[in-house]
Image (cartoon, rainbow, N blue to C red):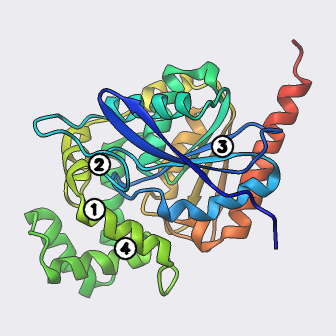
Amino acid sequence: MRDYSPATEGYAAFRGYKTRFRVVGKTRSRHALICIHGGPGYGLDYLEPLEEMQATGRQVVFYDQLGCGRSDHLRPGAAWSLELFVAELEAVIAAAGLFDCHVLGHGWGGMIALEYALRHPAGVASLVLSGTPASVPKWRAELAGLIRRLPEEIRAPLERQRRSGAPDTAPSRGLVDAFLRRHLCLLNPWPEELERSLAQARREPGARAALLGASELEPGGLLADWDLVPRLGEIDVPTLVTSGRADLVPPPLAAVLYREIPRSEWVVFEHSAHMPHLEEPQHYLEVLDGFLARVEVRAQLAPA
């Protein structure tokens, strides 16, 4: 059994809120890795397999975003925004004492990571984008394509629900879950940490509903027109793009990131949907560690 140090926890203060973060690993012989969860609203639980990265000699930092887990909730009358979550990430990085760290974003967390990398490139050793869209309109179109390719008995009622915005009743939830079994996570049963995160997101749907719309099939909300594709060429840090073959954010969207970000690599996990760190954990950790190690070696060899 590996000898891991106990996790330490803290809170980052920003704008009158407190965000809970968690640090694993007792050494900083290598750059730390900060992990940004998806949703919005999933909380850090489903990213737990990434704790294994501490075995490679680096600290790993997780946090519950505002409005979920053990972090504060938004004050009545306050407004959700992507800028709010970027400011939160800035506060967590400062509170955890991270400088020039690797930044990993999963799904929605990758959208935050992209915005952060554009604002603070000097503080990003590398960027890891796992199942991340750079354009909500393109993502919406790809999701519609996934639905069109489903068997008729699932496709037809899902199409009706998507077009009508049906309420979150038990029958409609069953239809969405059938879709998610094909494109969120292929494991059966789903891992317990993923179930915890899904339950968390459904208990606290405020951020998701405001920013990306209530439907998991039709991204909309305040970010309905969000599109960073024209700015991806400005990202000048080593970037790893990962996607599952059956991803909820399909490979054509990963291809956009790979094509537009100059110093990027792309790995497709053939036996995964949106959660390759859960579905193919050993392979995912090997790919991640290999990428981070190469980034650090190249940085050491680069002329001063």
The residue lying toward the viewer, choosing from 244 and 252, is 244
Dot 2 falls on a residue whose secondary structure is: loop
Q: Residue furthest top?
A: 304
Q: Name the residue at 15% across, 83% down.
A: 171
Amino acid type for the residue under numbered disc 2? Gly
Instruction: Indicate left or right for 158 with 253 as reference.
Output: left
Q: Which residue is mark 1?
A: 216
Q: Name the quadrant of the C terminus.
A: top right
Callout 4: few (<14), some (14-19), or many (20+) C-alpha neighbours within 10 Å? some
The residue lying toward the viewer, choosing from 51 and 149, is 51
Q: State the count of labels.
A: 4
Q: Which residue is mark 4?
A: 180
Dot 3 falls on a residue whose secondary structure is: strand
Can you give x and y, in whole percent of width and height, for residue 50 in the image?
64, 59
Q: Earlier in the sequence, mark 4 or mark 2?
A: 2
Separation (CA) of disc 1 from disc 4: 9 Å
Amino acid type for the residue under numbered disc 4? Leu
Marks 1,4: beta carbons within 8 A: yes
Separation (CA) of disc 3 from disc 2: 23 Å
Q: Name the residue at 45% across, 35% down.
A: 12
Can you give x and y, in whole percent of width and height, for residue 162 in the image?
17, 65
Q: Name the residue at 22% across, 57% down.
A: 205
Q: Earlier in the sequence, mark 3 or mark 1?
A: 3
Q: Name the residue at 40% across, 28% down.
A: 87
Q: Which residue is mark 2?
A: 67
Separation (CA) of disc 4 from disc 2: 23 Å
Marks 1,2: beta carbons within 8 A: no
Amino acid type for the residue under numbered disc 3? Leu
Q: Is residue 54 above or below residue 229?
A: below
Amino acid type for the residue under numbered disc 1? Glu
Q: Earlier in the sequence, mark 3 or mark 2?
A: 3
Q: Is residue 133 visible?
A: no
